[in-house]
Amino acid sequence: ADYSQGNHSNALASLVNMRETNSQLQKEIDVLRHEVRVATGQRAEVEKKLEERDEQLSETRDRLFQAKRRISELEASLRTSSEMNAILQSRHRHERSTCQATEQALARTRFALDRLGTAWQNDPSAASQDP
């Protein structure tokens, strides 16, 4: 009877020990589950931020691409404007040269007419004769 009572005591002690161990393990599991829930929530937040950053990066790349395209268009426009400006400056120089030549011809004609007029005033008969 002692032996069976000792086995029974040992069994009860073992059962109490197992219950304590089970309770301890359940607490650890509860803590770990809570940590998993927190980590899962944090992961969801991080993934959402990552998605937002990806979207911002995509928008920034689009804006950068559009800006580069606009710069290319403006550079082409600038080249065209520079070429047109060079053409207009060349025409202006040509027109100015032509104008100066015309002014010089006009000055020579005036000078010749003034001399002819002076000669006519001094000798009207000489001015009317054919050369």
Image (cartoon, rainbow, N blue to C red):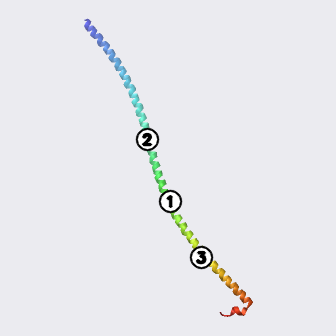
Give the labeled residue for mark 1.
Answer: 75
**Are the residues tagged 1 and 2 within 8 Å (C-beta)?**
no
Crowding at mark 2 (Cα within 10 Å: few <14, some 14-19, many 20+): few
Give the labeled residue for mark 3.
Answer: 98
Is residue 127 shown left or right of residue 5? right
- Residue 10 pos. (x, y %): 29, 11
Element type at mark 2? helix
Pick out the residue farthest to the right.
Answer: 122
Give the labeled residue for mark 2.
Answer: 50
Residue type at mark 1 is Glu
Element type at mark 1? helix
Crowding at mark 1 (Cα within 10 Å: few <14, some 14-19, many 20+): few
Is residue 103 shown left or right of residue 44? right
Marks 3 and 1, how far apart at CA: 34 Å
Q: Quadrant of the C terminus?
A: bottom right
Front-lying residue, 48 or 64: 64
Residue type at mark 2 is Leu
Element type at mark 3? helix
**Are the residues tagged 3 and 1 within 8 Å (C-beta)?**
no
Marks 3 and 2, how far apart at CA: 70 Å
**Residue shown at the point (62%, 78%) measured from the top left:** 102
Residue type at mark 3 is Thr
Residue 86 occupies quadrant: bottom right
Residue 117 occupies quadrant: bottom right
